[in-house]
Image (tube, rainbow, N blue to C red):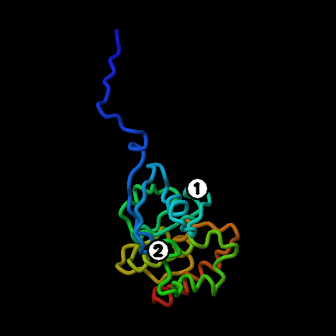
Amino acid sequence: MGISVRASSAPKSMSDETQSEIRLRVNGTTHDLTVDHRRTLLDALRESLGYTGPKKGCDHGQCGACTVLLDGRRVVSCLTLAVAADGAEVTTVEGLTTDGALHPIQQAFLRLEGFQCGYCTPGQICSAVAVLEEYSEGWPSAVTADVSSDALPGLDAREVRERMSGNLCRCGAYGGIVRAVLETAARAGDAA
């Protein structure tokens, strides 16, 4: 018994099968890239585009140092494939400033010592921006006492800790981080 092998008339090169052209809009600037299908969004941002805000911490989606906003929602960019972000709006910590002015959460992190070594800070800040947005949209968390009401109670320290729990800080600056999120929420009228 013989095995027959059917040859393709136009063999594809390995690069044709493993790479794609993608377009990312990062912090308001459009970038066209050719990426390997296995390349993470984090590596594309850092190595191909030079955005050093998102950090490679654990590279397993457990520490949150690589958190960015993808179409306004937070993601860990080390587990997000770049091809999955094709056509998306990506915001890194570098893109949170407006006309050179720091975002209110960035200002609060500085004022209330929401960081120590600073390695996790870009991911913490991106996550905090998303937390405030999610809360203002009425998204409950695992510790929200009453999810049946139309309005969430004011944001408190317990809610902030739960909502920020995917972002780790080896230095233990959690007290300052929680205060920074609560102060920013209070200024927006969302704090308890």
Q: Which of the 4 quarters of the picture holds residue 57?
A: bottom right
Q: Mark 2: which secondary structure?
A: helix
Residue 155: image x %, image y %?
49, 81
Q: Write the residue at 42% across / 72% down.
A: 29
- Amino acid, disc 1: Asp
- Is residue 159 in view from this perspective? no
Q: Which of the 4 quarters of the picture holds residue 121?
A: bottom right
Q: Which comes before the other along the chain, label 2 or label 1?
A: 1
Residue 180: image x %, image y %?
58, 83
Instruction: Classify mark 1: residues with Cα within 10 Å, few (<14), some (14-19) or many (20+).
Output: some
In depth, the one of 167 and 72 nearer the eye is 72
Question: Residue most toward the left?
Answer: 9
Q: Write the residue at 36% across / 73% down.
A: 148
Q: Is residue 68 left or right of residue 3?
A: right
- Amino acid, disc 2: Ala
Quadrant assignment for the N terminus: top left
Instruction: Classify mark 2: residues with Cα within 10 Å, few (<14), some (14-19) or many (20+).
Output: many
Q: Which of the 4 quarters of the picture holds residue 88?
A: bottom left
Q: Write the residue at 70% across / 72% down.
A: 117
Q: Nearer the viewer, mark 2 or mark 1?
A: 1
The circle drawn on residue 130 is 2
- Is residue 12 in view from this perspective? yes
The circle drawn on residue 49 is none
Residue 107: image x %, image y %?
57, 86
The circle drawn on residue 59 is 1
In depth, the one of 138 and 153 nearer the eye is 138
In depth, the one of 26 and 158 nearer the eye is 26
